[in-house]
Image: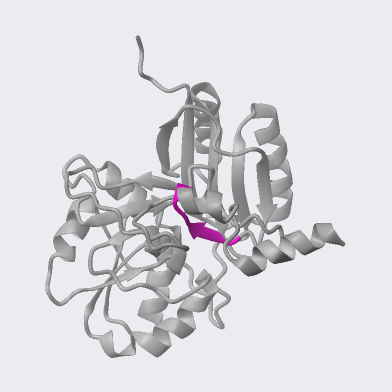
């Protein structure tokens, strides 16, 4: 009996100039609908960033289509097997930026970005005494899983990084800096920004955490917990060794757990770590205030 899963998940990005990106997004949406893939794709003048799911045949066809396009011939796809779709719909949205940074002086990763390190090179660097390891994601992504000894970013969104870095990391400009994120796209700009700010030695994890977890030599070592992903899976395992531990804590009771849920309040939908017992006890609300607000909506 075959253990090959019938669906796949593709994660990909490429910084490349797309002249009429809004028209491209419109045409790409139509193509995706006809093909039958589902997911979330962002298109900007500076490039494309997407996560989609589909059958093996559909994802093969998507990869071939993109590699036949002159702008995306060398685009790298990170591929995960899946039992089914991890998205309900397909969205292709034009945006001003692929990752919202809103810098006074924008960073073009094709011109300025940190040194790319393979998983093995990153693993070796992690163990050096003088290195500063910067998580390039949001705090809630960090809380469910991160590289050992990484700095927890006190940011709600990527656009908060410039001010946070200026306020908290300026003293480390002469230290080696390692950055990492889920798939690599945020670090392309984050590492460039650090160089722009005067940090002298900046490197980033090539392909992000998801690539690191698939490396046959490293096997995800020194990554604790799980990696947050932006689809229905919520989190995926990275460390493939006996060193794997749970680092997340339930939002309500503090129990060690690594599962996310959305707050049941339609005006909140806060993604929070929650154990199954507290999900039932608190009816999927993140707080008493959210539960009372939702009840008041139906009581009049």
Residue pushed farthest top?
A: 1
**Magenta span includes 273:** yes
- Percent x, y of residue 118: 24, 53
Residue at horizontal 78%, vertical 64%?
Answer: 296
Q: Nearer the viewer, residue 248 or 97?
A: 248
Question: Number of callouts in the render?
Answer: 0
Taking the image as shown, residue 48 lies to the left or right of residue 170, namely right
Taking the image as shown, residue 101 lies to the left or right of residue 210, namely right
Query: Which quadrant, please, contains the C terminus?
Result: bottom right
Query: Which quadrant, please, contains the N terminus?
Result: top left
- Percent x, y of residue 22: 72, 54
- Percent x, y of residue 270: 58, 62
Q: Nearer the viewer, residue 73 or 167?
A: 167
Question: Can you say whether 9 is above or below 242 in the image?
Answer: above
Question: Can you say whether 266 is above or below 112 in the image?
Answer: above
- What segment carries the magenta color? 270-276
Mark yes or no: residue 110 visible. Answer: no
């Amino acid at each position: 009996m075959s253990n090959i899963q019938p669906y796949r998940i593709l994660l990909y990005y490429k910084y490349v100039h797309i002249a009429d990106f809004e028209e491209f997004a419109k045409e790409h949406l139509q193509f995706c609908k006809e093909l039958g893939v589902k997911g979330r794709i962002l298109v900007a003048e500076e490039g494309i960033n997407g996560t989609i799911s589909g059958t093996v045949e559909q994802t093969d066809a998507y990869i071939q289509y993109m590699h036949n396009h002159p702008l995306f011939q060398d685009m790298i796809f990170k591929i995960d097997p899946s039992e089914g779709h991890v998205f309900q719909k397909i969205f292709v949205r034009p945006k001003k930026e692929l990752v919202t940074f809103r810098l006074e002086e924008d960073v073009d990763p094709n011109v300025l970005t940190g040194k790319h390190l393979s998983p093995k090179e990153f693993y070796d660097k992690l163990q050096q005494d003088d290195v500063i390891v910067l998580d390039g994601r949001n705090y809630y992504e960090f809380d469910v899983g991160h590289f050992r000894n990484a700095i927890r970013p006190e940011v709600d969104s990527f656009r908060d990084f410039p001010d946070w870095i200026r306020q908290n990391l300026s003293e480390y400009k002469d230290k080696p800096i390692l950055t990492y994120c889920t798939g690599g796209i945020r670090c392309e700009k984050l590492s460039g920004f650090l160089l722009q700010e005067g940090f002298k030695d900046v490197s980033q994890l090539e392909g992000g955490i998801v690539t690191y977890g698939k490396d046959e030599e490293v096997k995800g070592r020194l990554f604790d917990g799980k990696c947050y992903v932006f689809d229905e899976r919520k989190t995926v395992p990275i460390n493939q060794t006996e060193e794997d531990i749970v680092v997340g804590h339930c939002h309500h009771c503090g129990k060690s757990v690594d599962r996310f849920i959305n707050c049941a309040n339609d005006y909140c939908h806060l993604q929070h770590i929650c154990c199954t017992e507290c999900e039932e006890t608190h009816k999927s609300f993140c707080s008493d205030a959210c539960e009372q607000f939702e009840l008041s909506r139906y009581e009049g």
